Image (cartoon, rainbow, N blue to C red):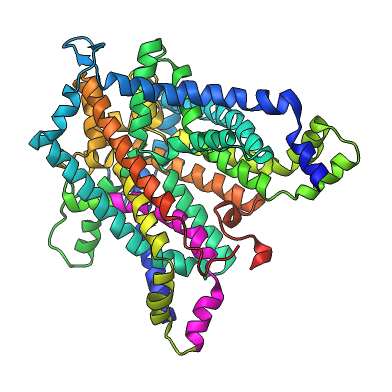
Amino acid sequence: MKLIRAIFMLLVLCFMSAPILVVLGVSVNEKKRLLFPPQGFSLNWYLELFTQQAWFNALMNSVIIALLASLLAVSVALPVALYLWQRNSVFARMLFGLGLAPFMLPPVITALGLLIFWVSVGGSGHMAATIISHGVFLVTLPLVTISLGLESMNRQLIEAARTMGADDKTVFLTVIRPLITPYIVSGFAFAFVLSLNEYIIAYMVAGFTVETLPIKIFNSLRYGYTPIMAAVAVLFAAVSIIVFGLVARFGDLPRLLGAAPKDVE
Amino acid sequence: MTDAKMSRHDQGFAGRVLLPAYPTVMLGLFFLIPLLIMLSVSFFHRVEGAFYEPAFEFSNYARFVDPFFIKIMGFSIGLSLSAALIAVMIAFPFTYLLTRSGRSLQIVALVFLLAVLSLSEVIIGFSWSTLLSRTAGISNLFVALGLMERTAAYYPSLPALVIGLVYLSFPYTVLVLYPSLSRLDPELSEAARMMGASPAKTFFTVVVPVMRRTIMSTIILAFVFTLGAYILPQTLGKPPHWTLSVHITDQAIFEANLPFAAAMAILLLLVSLVMVAITLLMGNDSKGAKG
């Protein structure tokens, strides 16, 4: 029985890692062909990503958008989470639901709405439009992590601080902020990784002028394959694994994903 | 206690008005208003060569009864539902076993699944098309093992598309199931085991029935998630396999028919909202769960 279980888990993990492993192999081919097993070994395609102007531009666009959009997402999510935590009013819950909505719906809906919106107000094709669109779309992630952080906070700490005469601002800066900072950082990290990988909103809002890496890959697919795409895929997978690995290293990942707290076990 | 509670509710202007004002404006302006504009555009009249002109007509919605459109809709729903069912059928036992494994194994698996979940659909499409290709694909392995004579390409095809969609929704499905399954009371299955049930029997006669509502809502959420797939039908499938999401973009960008694209997006929005509402109404399995 144990053996069957192990084989099943192993098969699933093989299925999940197979495409990534093949792409890893393809990315180190010596010649400009997609071959697996790879022929020769070369890290040249990773270098090309930084030296070929078009790919480097796409990389820079992606990084700038992801950084600013996830900052924006945190800035919107933090007050919503605090507000819901302070007063569980109908409006607070509605605002929370509105923050979750973009993520529950197929992204093409939000993407088309934003396309029509930016065409109407004249921001279509600008990087700022992509940043704002991503920022609002990705609010869900920091919203969920920060709310979880506030929930798991011991309310007696705040009451103690108040009893000792601390005002709202002092309570926030000295008690709440340090306790929820890890949750803010993980929310930021989640949003950053997802913005980096997001395709359809970036494409609809400004895809023809502001090319991000996913857009660049999809556009290039039409003109044939190059191992640079494989290098980007490996790089993105590596960034995600490092980011989530760090979140797991410094935080309680199972708890963040909804498992019961450790002490209940 | 009551005093403390009072003070929390009594935070004056800053807490009551300023705190929610900024996020309300941001979410309202850049999420709600775009959806409302899209709703109104779906009633507008298309102008060839331009965008559209304001009108109030149902012609865009009338196209939904077109046999061609019904076929697209039927195909999208059938495809997403099949992929969601397969994903949940694999993910449920997988997640159950995962939550019963050691914490460090759980963390490694969760980091990996989160990484795959956040991978761009473009990258997943590219990776699977490489894995199923003639030059770098799985058939090279079969040839090396002597199972096949020569290498072959397995995409674009419907099976390739289904495999890609299962791959896409699997990590999502595991993460939706993870909270409920990790809170499932271990005493429940222990009791069944004490009474002599085998682990497999315990799983099918105790765990699955107790979790049936969670399973149902996970299938629905995975279905909505898969409906949003946009790149995979284009990279792994053929044009007849294009789903509603692909057609929406195609109409908006390449046919420059924003009103019809908007009407299709509103339909997709309604379908998704109804589905999500059903999962909320069904609620979670509270029996046997703790924490």
Tell me where residue A235 sits by quadrant: top left
Which residue is located at x 63 percent, y 68 percent?
A265
Left or right of residue A196: residue B267: left
Q: Is residue B242 above or below residue B200?
A: above
Tell me where residue A123 sits by quadrant: top left
Which residue is located at x 68 percent, y 27 percent?
B16
Left or right of residue A144: residue B50: left
Q: Is residue B91 above or below residue A20?
A: below
Q: Can the viewer see residue A91?
A: yes
Q: Is residue A245 above or below residue B184?
A: above
The quadrant of the rendering that contains the N terminus of chain A is: bottom left
Q: Position of residue B272 (x, y in %)?
A: 33, 41
What are the residue bounds of the magenta stretch?
B165-194
* Residue A133 sits inside the magenta stretch: no
Q: Furthest residue to the bottom?
A: B196
Q: Which is nearer the eye, B104 or B147?
A: B104
Magenta: predominant secondary structure element? helix
Which residue is located at x 48 percent, y 17 percent?
A128
Left or right of residue B277: residue B145: left
Q: Position of residue B286 (x, y in %)?
A: 51, 63
Q: Which is nearer the eye, B16 or B256?
A: B16
